[in-house]
Image (spheres, rainbow, N blue to C red):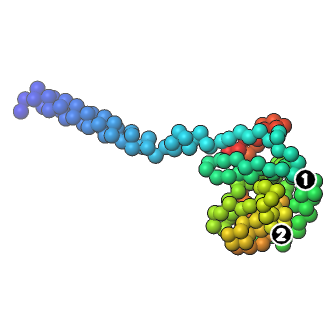
Amino acid sequence: MTAHSKDRRDFLQLTGFAFGAVGVACAAAPMINSLNPAKDTLALATTEVDISAIPVGGSKTVMWRGKPVFIKHRTAEQIQEAEEVDVTTLIDKQTDEERVKKPEWLVVVGVCTHLGCIPGGQKPTDAHGEYHGWFCPCHGSHYDTSGRIRKGPAPKNLMVPPYEFIGDTKIKIG
């Protein structure tokens, strides 16, 4: 075998490997990209909510990541009731201060932690349960004015989503 044919063989092998590597990369790129979240899901990752129209004692439900989020403008009585609870008596021990950023505003994901039902209590005509918060009629979970489980089979408090105040009248959830 001559030196020329050996060099030619090496060149053809390297070229073949290079084309193979490019082919594998081209085939793998769409598969890897398919693992990224869809654009409509990314659009729901955060949501801004104007809370200026929610009266004291009123509430609003917004959707975030496909789940309802309860925003409650609590009254002074509701704040006092939530703050005076003896934490040692709670199923999921959290103080009211750990659950709110401003005492007058409570923001929780409105999904019962027992089996994923939507508790009632957002409307004045809804059943609010024994602790004046939310009541899940499916299995009888009672939540207080801080969204903490007080009675029933639910093992955890209503989840507080990540949120921040971006002004006096707006919050950003997510």
Above or below: residue 87 compared with residue 66: below
Q: Residue at x 78, y 55 (%)?
A: 123
Secondary structure of residue under mark 2: loop
> Along the line of sight, which residue is nearer the eye, 64 or 163?
64
Q: Name the residue under label 1.
A: 75
Horizontally, residue 106 falls left or right of residue 36, namely right
Label 1 Cα neighbours within 10 Å, binned few <14 / some 14-19 / many ≥20 = some
Above or below: residue 174 compared with residue 13: below
> Along the line of sight, which residue is nearer the eye, 85 or 18?
85
Q: Image quarter for residue 52? A: top right
Q: Which residue is drawn at 74% across and 40% down?
A: 49
Q: Residue at x 71, y 68 (%)?
A: 137
Residue 65: x, y in percent? 62, 48
Horizontally, residue 151 falls left or right of residue 28, namely right
The amino acid type of the residue labelled 1 equals Thr
Q: Residue furthest top?
A: 4
Q: Which quadrant does the C terminus fall into?
A: top right
Residue 79: tell me if it is visible: yes
Which of pointers 1 and 2 lies earlier in the amino acid sequence?
1
Q: Name the residue under label 2.
A: 130
Q: Image quarter for residue 5? A: top left
Q: How far apart are marks 1 and 2 (CA)?
A: 17 Å
Secondary structure of residue under mark 1: loop
Residue 77: x, y in percent? 93, 57
